[in-house]
Structures are given as C-alpha cells and as structure tokens.
Image: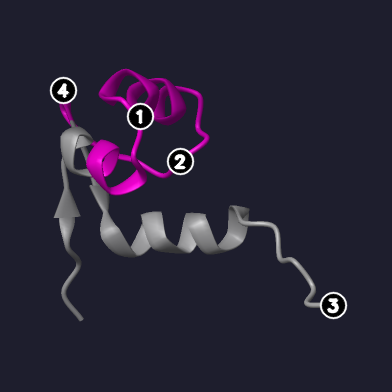
Amino acid sequence: MTSSVMTVRDVANYLHLSEATVYQMARTGRIPVVHMGRIWRFTKESIDAWIEHSTEKVKAS
C-alpha cells in the first residue's frame, strides 16, 4: 500500500484551512504529522483517519 505524502500547503488546501492553522494544529498534536528534520509531512491516509475519528457522527432522524 502506497501512502500519499502531503505538504503543509497540501493539507491546508485539503482541509480548507490556512497554512498557519495547519502548523499550529501539528505543533500542538491535534493532527498527525511526520517530522523529517525541519520538514513536516503528512500522509493522506493519516489525515483521512484523523477526520473520520474527529468528525462527530450525526444520527439520522
């Protein structure tokens, strides 16, 4: 299985957030990030899993 590697800009666009917000969320551990030296990368799979886990499920009426 191949993981799609994403940059901060990619994640910001994907989540419709600013890059500053993505950095802040990654710094505080709110979203999963991989540090490669000074470079921060994300995998699409980990972001999608984070979204799935973080999204409140709404029961249909």
Q: Toward which corner of the image does residue 59 lie, by quadrant?
A: bottom right
Is 13 drawn above or below residue 5 in the view shown? Answer: above
Q: How much space separates mark 2 and mark 4, taking CA atoms?
A: 17 Å
Q: Give the farthest residue toward the front.
A: 61
The disc label shown at residue 22, or none: 1
Residue 38 badge: 4
Residue 8 lies, in percent from the top left, at 22, 34
**Which of the marked residues, 3 or 1, is nearer the chain's N terminus?**
1
Residue range of the region highlighted in magenta in the rendering: 11-39
Marks 1 and 2, how far apart at CA: 8 Å
Q: Residues within 10 Å of mark 1 (few under 14, many from 20)?
A: many
Q: Nearer the viewer, mark 2 or mark 3?
A: 3
Assign the C terminus to one quadrant of the image. bottom right
Residue 54, position as x, y percentages in the image: 61, 53
Q: Label 1, secondary structure: give it.
A: helix
Q: Residue at x 35, y 32 (%)?
A: 17
In the image, 34 versus 54, the foreground residue is 54
Q: Which residue is mark 3?
A: 61
